[in-house]
Amino acid sequence: MRSIIFASRNQKEIIRDPINIAFGIGFPLVVLLLLSAIQANIPVGLFKIERLAPGIAVFGLSFFSLFSGMLIAKDRSSSFLLRLFASPLTSTDFIIGYIMPLFPMAALQSGFCFLVSFFLGLQANVNVLLALLVLLPCSLLYIAIGLLTGSIFTDRQVGGISGALLTNLSAWLSGTWFDLNLVGGTFEKIADMLPFVHAVDAVRAAIAGEVESIFPDLWWVIAYALVLLVAAVLVFKKKMNSDQV
Amino acid sequence: MIAIQTKALTKRYKDILAVDRLDLSIEQGTLFALLGVNGAGKTTTIKMLSCLIRPTGGDAVLLGDSIITEPEAVKEKINVSPQETAVAENLSVRENLELIAGIYGSDKKESRSKTAEMISALGLSDVAKQKAKTLSGGMQRRLSIAMALISNPQILFLDEPTLGLDVFARRELWSIIKKLKGKVTVILTTHYMEEAEALSNNIGIMVKGKLIAVGTASELIAKTKAQNFEEAFIALAKGSEVSR
């Protein structure tokens, strides 16, 4: 019950910040429309809506690292977390409270992305529901990154790391903007070792209805998400018991 | 009845001894001011007593529960208003209060009635619907104290509650704090002499982590044969430094 009360506060804090709404929902949709306009004028296979929409859906989730990271870092710097650490909230309450409200928001954002994609030619069928399910572990991946960075860095640093570095890194290495095979070499190898391209490929497989192709890629995402989540929980718990919140 | 009893409470950060074998006894219902210059160890003491940091030595018993062995039980009885205002910025005054009431175990109905009570008691009615980030510094402090009081704590820690406030906002907060006397055990840290003198039943003076004197303002003035409390504080603090 306490964790739900805390989660509700966290949800309000995030959705009441207009910058979060602009970046979380507005910006990915603008990119989707822009790249679709390019596709309409100069057809590029990569920007076909059934390949583009999954990439944008995953790109949109990268902002959730920023939201969760900023919220935790601000709570630390404003001493709000200090006040709550003196309360009967347990570490489990904190972790559930920070993670849970972001899932429905992430699902809503992905839903918006696909809804707009329907108007751009994406087929509305059961595969979209499958894609939304595949996006859940992808959401966890980005939320865990936010929990980890928010527990370690200041809100300014989180802005730089999650807002600039991660969103760009996860976009470039996802195979959404350009085909990674065309770059090849070390760049492609690094991209393959990271979860971002696997997240996009898993959602693309879901949209294409190729169920058997989802899992090799989704395992990468799930493994990364779990490792990062465990790391984030351990760091947060350590902060709770340390001298410096 | 004793509300707080510390036994050789110590906190060391590497080479710095922040709190040095603090022995303190505070009666229930009293307002105890911890006075000292910056770095004297006041905030560290409050953080240890409110289970936010672990002591490196000694222990403290709050209403029968040890901060080392029973921190969960201690947390149920206390609340803290930190040095920074520590409010949820995008939540309204009412929502901030309901949040804290809920975290301390009140159901929705009880949270609402306690919130209404706090809003009225601390003069927050005019700003109840306003987001916390839009409040003035004085109102944010008021909200911070209301958030600390809404759980009906038996012991309340106020860490420099009037820091940075103008004289009017400070006096308004003083009158709120004075009303708590006899009902709640309040531990207040400050480096304003007049604040300690005006508000507290007892004053403890800390210098470089050590508690060097405890007494009422008039007892400390008499002890040092000073003209006023500020001179008494200076005499005690300087005397302590010379004897080190």
Image: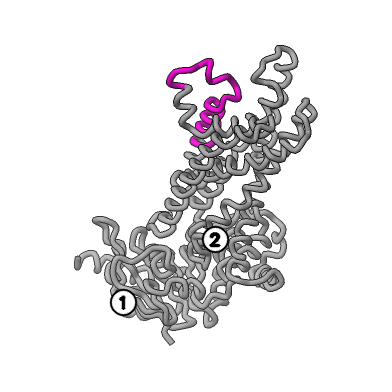
Crowd around label 1: few <14 · some 14–19 · many ≥20 (10 Å):
some
Q: Quadrant of residue B242?
A: bottom left
Q: Residue at x 80, y 28 (%)?
A: A119
Q: What residue sits right under mark 2 in the picture?
A: A93
Q: Does residue A203 appear left or right of residue B228 in this picture? A: right
- In the displayed structure, would residue B102 be above or below residue A55? below
User: Residue A108: x percent and y percent?
Assistant: 70, 43
User: Residue A31: x percent and y percent?
Assistant: 67, 26
Crowd around label 2: few <14 · some 14–19 · many ≥20 (10 Å):
some
Q: Residue at x 60, y 35 (%)?
A: A214
- Asked if residue B167 can be seen in this view, the reply is yes
Q: Residue at x 59, y 30 (%)?
A: A201
Q: Quadrant of residue A138?
A: top right
The outermost residue toward the bottom is: B1
Determine the secondary structure under disc 1.
strand
Looking at the picture, which amino acid does disc 1 mark?
Lys
Magenta stretch, main secondary structure class: helix
Q: What residue sits right under mark 1 in the picture?
A: B7
* Count of numbered circles on the image: 2
